[in-house]
Amino acid sequence: MAGKTIKLWLNHQQHELLERAVADGAAPSLEALVKRAIAESQPLPAGQPEVK
Amino acid sequence: MSERQPVFEWIMQPGTGKALELRKGQILRIEQVLGAQCVDFNCFNLHDYKEFMHCGRTRTVHGFNPSKGTFLWSAPPRERAMMYIAEDTYGRNDVLFPRCSAYLYESAYGYHTHTNCHDIQSEAQREYGLTPDDVHDSFNMFMCTEVTLEGSATITRQQSRKGDHIDLIALMDVLAVPNVCGADVMRTSNFGLKPIRLQIFEATDEEMAAVPATPTLRSQRTPKDFVNSQIKATRELVADESYVPQFANTPLPETPLEIELDAEETARFEALARRSIYGDDDDSALRDIVFSWWENRYLSSASGAPRISTAE
């Protein structure tokens, strides 16, 4: 599978929350924080509705 | 002070309610005289009746059956702990069902007039100048309810006994208003109406010390923080021509953050993207992943409610 670029649109409130996590040391940058979220998230178990 | 000091006692007869002033640090005991009697309950800030118990907030923080070790919370934007349940010997209460009303007994049972919690509550609260419109959603004590798998709520019979009681500690000065639920033709109180004993005590230092601390936050706003703190005195709703909206944090424009994913990250993203919800909208799918991760890592309790350490 090829790589891709995604434009993540955030309002200032969403931005602030993630910036706080960066300031808290969760990642060196917002981009790195997003990648960490992808890396640490678990796919849904088979059969579980995606709305959960 | 080491012993409880009773300062008031009252037997609440079927079909009646009682408005009671409690000062911060007093305990209201609501006790079964014969057993199996539901009690509906309202609670107001004694110095500002616009602050009142909010079943929705209480339900969100403590679940459908608030019992020993939980709080009665006031409505937004106050959201303060008004009372604390220090004891609950039966342990079955309800914040799902509304109070029963005259409408119910007329529509379902054909009564012209019948005892009902709304009207009893309203009559008891009238002593303090409140109107029928001021009765709020009821905290239903000694009321057994269930939620079915299909999502509907039902009332069941109950098994509270003589002497079962709930002790509520006032955490602010309140007007507490219990009433004997008027439902004598329902299973709520096992098809009967029975008296309820009310007592007020001074809480001991030990009892006050056992109340868990709750947060004090800027967002717990009181009238001094309101743009409009005046209580409306007329019934008609008329637009204020000088009104200028002051919605917080608005406008809310969005700015883009470009995220370059390599092949492995893209594959992982695709495994996480909830396509049945977001379709081919990568932006929304990624926002979900990021904020779900944040919730799992940082959110300290369910539904955004403050974490409450409950008593054993």
Image: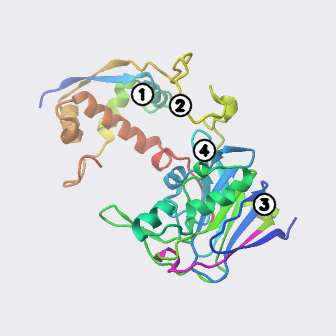
Residue drawn 27% across the image and 46% down it: A51
Report which quarter residue B231 is drawn in. top right
Asked if labels 1 and 2 share a chain, the reply is no
Label 1 marks a residue whose chain is A
Q: Which residue is mark 3?
A: B26
- Which type of secondary structure does the marked residue at label 3 adopt? strand
Quote the CA–CA distance across marks 3 and 2: 40 Å
Towards the viewer: B76 or B240: B240
Residue B205 percent coordinates (x, y): 81, 61
Towards the viewer: B306 or B88: B88
Quote the CA–CA distance across marks 3 and 4: 21 Å
Q: Which residue is mark 2?
A: B237
Quote the CA–CA distance across marks 3 and 1: 43 Å
Asked if labels 3 and 2 share a chain, the reply is yes
Q: Which residue is mark 4?
A: B79
Q: Which residue is mark 1?
A: A14
Q: Is residue B197 magenta?
A: yes
Quote the CA–CA distance across marks 1 and 2: 36 Å
Label 2 marks a residue whose chain is B
Instruction: Name the mark nearer the viewer: 1 or 2.
Output: 2
Q: Is residue B118 magenta?
A: no
Instruction: Name the mark nearer the viewer: 4 or 2.
Output: 2
- Which type of secondary structure does the marked residue at label 1 adopt? helix
Instruction: Give, as a single range, the part of the protein colored magenta.
Output: B187-199
In primary-sequence order, the first of circles 3 and 4 is 3
